[in-house]
Amino acid sequence: MIGPPPAVRAILPAGALVLGQDQADPSGLAAGRPVVLTDSRPGARARLRRRAGRLGLTLEGEHVVLPTWGSAAFVVEDDRHVVGWLWDTLATVPPRARRSAPLVELAVRLGTLRPVRRALLWGAPGRVLVGRVGGRP
């Protein structure tokens, strides 16, 4: 990962230290410093929360990057209601999808089920955690 995509950069706090999944945890961070942790692998929520704990961050926000980290068009709050709204509003069968339309329609309908949404959130292709070292100064 070479850095956050533009959609993610738009939500970063000023002066934030951005740490990607492959970067080592720094030591000696000043209290109150904004830190942004990113991860583009499935199951990143737990990894980011553990890392935030190791760094002593107070959580300010968690976001999901969609549709993928490499082609991020949306950065939404990591909340099942927000992601559900996004799915209900934007998920549709694309025009001219004649052959695959029944399969896509099935996927769109399955995406309205709570267990499927939980799985989608767990396996989201990109996550961003925003926090501050030791909370606000």
Image: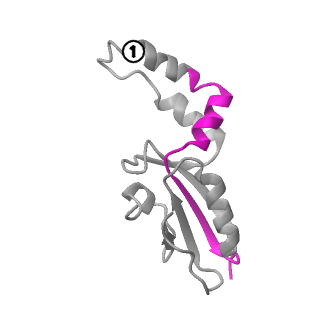
Please give the name of the residue rendered at 68% of the width and 63% of the height, measured from the top-left corner.
50
Q: Which of 80 and 44 is in front in this view?
A: 44
Q: Residue 83 location, x and y as percent?
A: 58, 39
Answer whether residue 122 is visible to the viewer in this image.
yes
Q: In which quarter of the image is the N terminus?
A: bottom left
**Residue at 43% of width from left, 12% of height from top?**
102
Question: Crowdedness of circle 1 by 10 Å Cα count: few (<14), some, many (20+)?
Answer: some
Q: Is residue 4 positioned above or below 112 on the image?
A: below
Q: Give the range drawn in magenta.
A: 110-137
Q: In which quarter of the image is the C terminus?
A: bottom right
Query: Residue lying furthest left in this view?
Result: 96
Q: What element carries label 1?
A: helix
> Which one is in front, 106 or 132?
106
Q: In this view, does 61 lie to the left or right of 68?
A: right
Residue 108, image x and y in percent?
51, 23
Residue 80 percent coordinates (x, y): 65, 40
Residue type of the residue flagged with mark 1:
Ala
Residue 104 placement: quadrant: top left
The image shows residue 29 at horizontal and vertical percentages of 60, 84
Q: Residue at x 65, y 67 (%)?
A: 52
Residue 66: say if magenta: no
Please give the residue where the numbered disc 1 appears in the rendered image. 101
Please give the count of numbered marks on the rendered protein: 1
Colour scheme of the picture: one colour
Residue at coordinates 43% horizontally, 50% vertically from top-left?
A: 69
Residue 57 in view: no
> Is residue 127 covered in magenta?
yes
Left or right: where does residue 6 sit relative to residue 109? Answer: left
Q: Is residue 96 above or below residue 51?
A: above
